[in-house]
Image (tube, rainbow, N blue to C red):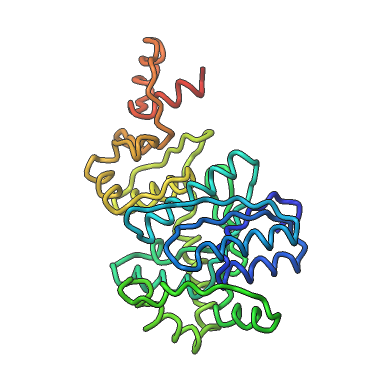
Amino acid sequence: MEKSSNNLLAFSAGVDSTALFFRLMENNISFDMAIVNYHTRETSNEEVEYAKELARKYNKKIYIKDCYLEKFSEKSARECRYRFFEEIIKNHGYDTLITAHQLNDRFEWLLMQLGKGAGLKEIIAMGEWEEREGYKIYRPFYNVSRKEIVAFLNEKGIKYFIDRSNFDKKYKRNFIRDEFANKFIDLYAEGVKKSFEYLENDLNLLFQKNWKKKEKLYRFQKTSPEIDIKKTDLILKELGVIMSKAQRDEVIKTGFSCVIQGKIAIDSNEKHIYIAPYIKTAMDKEFKEKMRKEKIPPKVRGYIYKFDS
């Protein structure tokens, strides 16, 4: 990682992000901090105060968000968190978001996806780097176990907070973490690291980016719905949109002709699938005729019109 990058650390004052804070300091990597207070635990305010204390001591900018959710869930918390991060990145010119996801997190995800019924693309997540629209995500701990992280904190005598809600097994992820993931990683961490390396290599070979791109307009040749939806999923992730299962089902059901979240247009003709930001605008007759002759499907024409004009 370039030490000159403009980095934002997603901080929580928990085990992983606290260790990452001090690891980045040790490696002279510059960064600022962002923390979200969900006000769901007795220690929530203390965690924010600890983050502010670290920011003052080590001369870091810190951004704080109060996120009140009617009903707390991992999904809604994540959505709130990433809206906040992306707003900071956009408004303050950061190019890299650093997160503290580690080996146990990746293995938990794999087990959860296996339990749902998933393919290779779905079970492998949280690699070292991830491209998003306008920024990158960097995960320095992606191949480091939680046991190693705790050992580092204890050895250095560094203060951190423990999220007690992580022990509540009514949440599926906590159940998988406590009953399976942590125990397995404690026994076979090195083997799991190697397996993830092999799986990522296989994934790169199977899902190479064999599509054409002009600015944010993507085009690829149709094959089968099963393969096409995986390519569509990858492209939408590049555009900063993560589709739900319901949305993927909708894309297939509509024959790859719909608008996702009101902002990404997916459309197709006999041979190709097109994806672009959705722009609804008036177009002149000459342009419409040109699009008709070139067999460009309607939903992406607005973006092409804006880009070409």
Quarter containing the N terminus: bottom right
Observer-nearest residue: 109 or 231?
Answer: 109
Q: Furthest-left residue in view?
A: 253
Residue 191 shown left or right of residue 5 in the figure: left
Q: For this view, does 115 lie left or right of residue 58?
A: left
Rendered residue at 35%/26% (across/down): 295
Q: Position of residue 21 (x, y in %)?
A: 66, 65
Q: How many marks?
A: 0
Q: Residue at x 39, y 19 (%)?
A: 281
Residue 193 lies, with reference to residue 227, above or below; the image says: below
- Residue extending furthest toward the bottom: 187
- Decide if residue 70 is on the left or right side of residue 240: left
Q: Quadrant of residue 121?
A: bottom left
| Percent x, y of residue 108 | 42, 73
- On screen, residue 282 versus residue 217, left or right, reads left
Up/down of 174 relative to 138, above or below: below
Residue at the (55%, 73%) spot, across then down: 161
Identify the residue shown where x is 50% and y is 79%.
192
Q: Is 102 above or below relative to 91? A: below
Q: Nearer the viewer, residue 76 or 210?
A: 76
Viewer-proximal residue, 108 or 24? 24
The residue positioned farthest toward the top in the image shown: 285
- Residue 144, by quadrant, is bottom right
